Amino acid sequence: MAAVVYLRGARARPGWPAWRAALFLLGLASLIAALASPIDAIALQLFSVHMVQHMLLLVVATPLLLAG
């Protein structure tokens, strides 16, 4: 849903750089990777995977979403 709203708004603005939309979509993909993949299930059992999940959310997803 967020991707659809973002892309619709980016398309409505002339001159919106495609790289910003790509960064936003990569941020959403990293959110999905952290929260809706096997990483989430394994994170309940292994603390190291839980911390990888935190790093994906804080170090990867957040800057990509903000840059987009």
Image: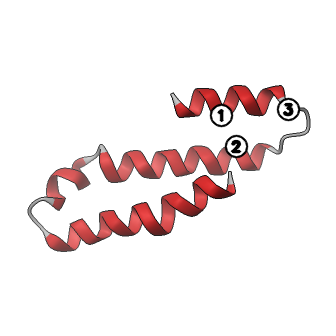
Instruction: Give above or below for 37 relative to 3.
Output: below
Dot placed on the residue nearer the N-terminal end, 3 or 2: 3
Q: Position of residue 27 (x, y in %)?
A: 54, 51
Gap in angstroms between the C-alphas marked 3 and 2: 12 Å
Instruction: Give above or below for 9 relative to 20.
Output: above
Q: Position of residue 41 (x, y in %)?
A: 16, 51
State the residue at coordinates (57%, 33%). Answer: 3
Dot placed on the residue nearer the N-terminal end, 1 or 3: 1
Gap in angstroms between the C-alphas marked 1 and 3: 11 Å
**What is the quadrant of residue 12 in the picture?**
top right
What type is the residue that disc 1 sits on? Tyr
What type is the residue that disc 2 sits on? Ala
Residue density around tag 1, few if under 14, some if 14–19, many if 20 or more, within 10 Å: some
Dot placed on the residue nearer the N-terminal end, 2 or 1: 1
View extreme (left): residue: 45
Instruction: Give above or below for 33 relative to 55.
Output: above
* Res. 6 mark: 1
State the residue at coordinates (23%, 66%). Answer: 50
Mark 2 or 1, which is nearer the eye? Answer: 1
State the residue at coordinates (22%, 67%). Answer: 49
The residue at which mark 2 appears reads as: 21
Q: Is residue 32 left or right of residue 9?
A: left
- Mark 2 touches mark 1? (CB < 8 Å): yes
Q: Is residue 31 left or right of residue 1?
A: left
What type is the residue that disc 3 sits on? Arg
SS assignment at label 1: helix
Residue density around tag 3, few if under 14, some if 14–19, many if 20 or more, within 10 Å: few
Q: Position of residue 16 (x, y in %)?
A: 84, 40
SS assignment at label 3: loop
Mark 3 or 2, which is nearer the eye? Answer: 3
**What is the quadrant of residue 8 in the picture?**
top right
* Res. 13 mark: 3
